[in-house]
Image (cartoon, helix red, strand yellow):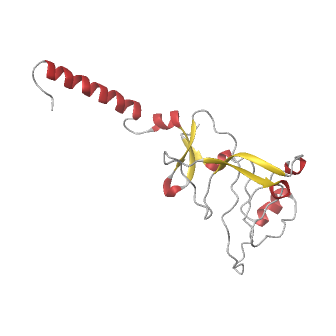
Amino acid sequence: MQATFPLSDRFKFFRFETREEFSQKTGLVCPPFAEYGQPKYWFDPDALKSPRLNVLYDNVVAYDEKGHPLSGSDGQPILDVLVLPKARAATVNIPPTDETFDHPILAEVPVPLLPLGPDEELFFATFGIVAIRNRKLYQESLAGFGADDRALLKHIGGLAQAIANKIGGGLW
């Protein structure tokens, strides 16, 4: 098991990179791109079975309208819910990759995630990319001292200072 890993390791649905990949992996013709809709690179094969008009996904990274991940009060990425009409949840909206396509592209619809494990959390990795970290394994993987080690050293340092003060001298 790794201490940190990409968000894609917890995607609930496969994310297709291109229209061609969608067709190759599903055997279906990729639907036409709705030019002024949000790109959507995944689909929920069970969405149309829902008795409701909309489908709710509980674990989705929250993004602003420009596609930048939002952070909570702790400075880390946050999860939100995503509600989609079931017909939209059941299909993709993948833009073409040819160079003649010049329409503005909106931020994509995020891929729902499987639930995080009890020791897992979202964090901002290099370049602000959202990733997942196993807190226990991450602490163990740190070179040098981890948070527990620092707390212990602070405690020991406080005891050493108290002893030095008691015997008539200070350490610092």
- Tell me the residue at 46%/37% (across/down): 141
Drawn side of residue 54 relative to residue 115, left or right: right
Drawn side of residue 18 relative to residue 29, left or right: left
* Image quadrant in which you'd find residue 168: top left
> Which quadrant: the N terminus?
top right
Drawn side of residue 135 relative to residue 87, left or right: left
- Tell me the residue at 18%/20% (across/down): 163
* Image quadrant in which you'd find residue 23: bottom right
> Which quadrant: the C terminus?
top left
Q: Position of residue 152 (x, y in %)?
A: 34, 27
Residue at the limit of the structure toward the bottom, as seen here: 100
Drawn side of residue 34 relative to residue 58, left or right: right
User: Does residue 111 lie above or below 4 as drawn?
Assistant: below
Q: How many marks?
A: 0
- Tell me the residue at 82%/58% (across/down): 88
- Tell me the residue at 63%/35% (across/down): 117
Q: Position of residue 87 (x, y in %)?
A: 85, 57
Q: Position of residue 131 (x, y in %)?
A: 57, 48
User: Does residue 55 lie above or below 152 as drawn?
Assistant: below
* Image quadrant in which you'd find residue 94: bottom right
Residue at the limit of the structure toward the left, as seen here: 168
Q: Position of residue 157 (x, y in %)?
A: 25, 28
Pick the residue in front: 168 or 54: 54
User: Does residue 134 lie above or below 42 as drawn?
Assistant: above
User: Does residue 49 lie above or below 25 as drawn?
Assistant: above
